[in-house]
Image (spheres, rainbow, N blue to C red):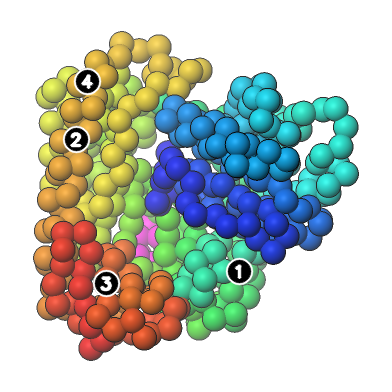
Amino acid sequence: MSDQDVHTSPPESPADEGGNEILTFGCRLNSWESEVMRGHAKSAGLNGAIIVNTCAVTNEAVRSARQAIRKARRANPDAPIIVTGCAAQINPDEFADMPEVTRVIGNADKMKAETYQPHILLGGNNKKSVSDIMQVKDVAGHLVDGLDGRARAYVQIQTGCDHRCTFCIIPYGRGDSRSVPAGDVVEQVKTLVGTGHQEIVLTGVDLTSWGSDLPGEPNLGRLVQAILNNVPDLPQLRLSSIDAIEIDEALFDALISQERIAPHLHLSLQAGADMILKRMKRRHLRADAIKLCQRLKAARPDLAFGADIIAGFPTETEEMFEDSLNLVDECDLAYLHVFPYSPRPGTPAARMPQVDRAVIKQRAARLRKKADAMLVKHLAGMVGSVQNGLVEKPGFARAPNFAGIRLTDKAPRTGAILPIRMTGHDGKVLEGEPA
C-alpha cells in the first residue's frame, strides 16, 4: 500500500530547464518516476507543460490531484496539462472529462521516452492514451541521478503487485508484479555510486516480490547480496516499504549481518487483529509480525521499524482496534504511517459493513498520538550516541535508522556521511553536532 513518505499533496516542483512543471502525489516510487518523466520530456523537446503524476491509494489523494489540476489551470491558462499516474490509469475518463486536462496517459506509457514527443503527446483528437496495465509483462530499468541531490539515489527494482488485498486499488493502477533483472540493478547502483551518491534506496510497489517473474525465481535477499558484493564502494543500502511475511532467509541474514544495510525497515502491517488481517486478505497474522520484529531486534538491536496501519477498516470493533494500538508497542514501531480507512470503489472492502466516519477519525487520531509517543521514545534513546549521519541539506542529516538530525553546524556538504553526536531532541527530530 505504501512506500516511504506517502503524501497526498504535491511537493514544491519548480519548472525544469525545459520549462515543464511536474506535480507528484503519492509514494516515493511516483517521485522517482516523475524524475524519469522529467528527463524524457526534456529530451523530447516538450516545453511549458504541467505534468500531474497522480496517486490512487485514498479518495483524498484523488481529490487533491483534481484540485491541483484546477489550480494549475487558473495559474497557467495556456499550458498543456498532462495527467498520469495510478488514479489516471484506474479512472482515465474521470480526468479526461475535466476541461482543464489536455491529455491523460497511463502508467505504462508515462515511462516511455516516445510518449513525450510534442507532436504525439499534444497532437490529434484522442485525449486518452491508456493501455491495459494487466497486459504489461516487463519493466525497464531507468537511471535517475539526483532525486535527492547528492545525498541518495533511488533505484526501482520492480513495479506492480500480484496480491489482491481487499482494501487496495493499486494493482489495477500498476498491474502485476514485474522485476528489473539483477544485472541491470547492479549496474545502475554502480553508476550512481560512481557519481558520488552515498546511499542507494531500493524501491518498488511490492519490493519483496522481486524476482518471482524472473528465470529461476531469485529472491530479494539474493539481489541485496549481489549489490553488496559487486558494489563494495557503496556506503549504505536502504530498503523501502516491504511485506514482512516475504522476508526470506537470505534477506534476513543480510539485514542482521551487513552493516552497510541501513538499520531501518518500513513494514506493511496494516492491522493488529487477526480477523481484520484475514478480511484484508493479508498473508500474515498478528503473531507473525511480532515474532519477526522481535527476532530481528534481538539479532540487530539498532534496527528501527516503521509500519503502515489502517484505522477503521470495515467491521473493525473497538477490541480489534486495540489490537492494532497494542501492536505498536509489541513490535516497537518507531515510525507510523496512519491511514484512516477510505473505501475505494471496485474493491471488496468497499462492499463490507463500514465503520462510522467519526469513529474512524477518532481511531486514527489515537494511533497518531501513539505514534508521537513512540517517536519520542525512539529519539530519546538515541541522545548521547554517535551516528553516521547522511547530510541531506545544509543543517539537516538523517541517521541510518531514519531519524532526522538537525545540525548545529550547517557547513557539511550535502551528501557527506559524518559522525554526529546526538545532544537532544524536540520530539520530532534529533539535535546533533559533529563528533
Tell me if I can see residue 4 in this picture.
Answer: yes
Circle 4 is placed at which residue position?
358
Q: CA distance from mark 2 to mark 4?
A: 11 Å
- Which tag, 2 or 4, sits closer to the chain's start? 4
Circle 3 is placed at which residue position?
406
Q: Residue at x 78, y 48 (%)?
A: 116
Say which of marks 1 and 4 sits in front: 4
User: In the figure, 293 relative to 26: above or below?
Assistant: below
Q: CA distance from mark 3 to mark 4?
A: 37 Å
Question: Callout 4: few (<14), some (14-19), or many (20+) C-alpha neighbours within 10 Å?
Answer: few
At mark 2, the secondary structure is helix
Residue type for callout 1: Asp
- Which tag, 1 or 4, sits closer to the chain's start? 1
In the foreground, 267 or 426: 426
Circle 2 is placed at which residue position?
365
Mark 3 and mark 4 residues within 8 Å of each other at the beta carbon: no
213 relative to 286 in the view: left or right = right
Which region is colored magenta? 249-256
Mark 1 and mark 3 residues within 8 Å of each other at the beta carbon: no
Circle 1 is placed at which residue position?
145
Tell me if I can see residue 82 in this picture.
Answer: no
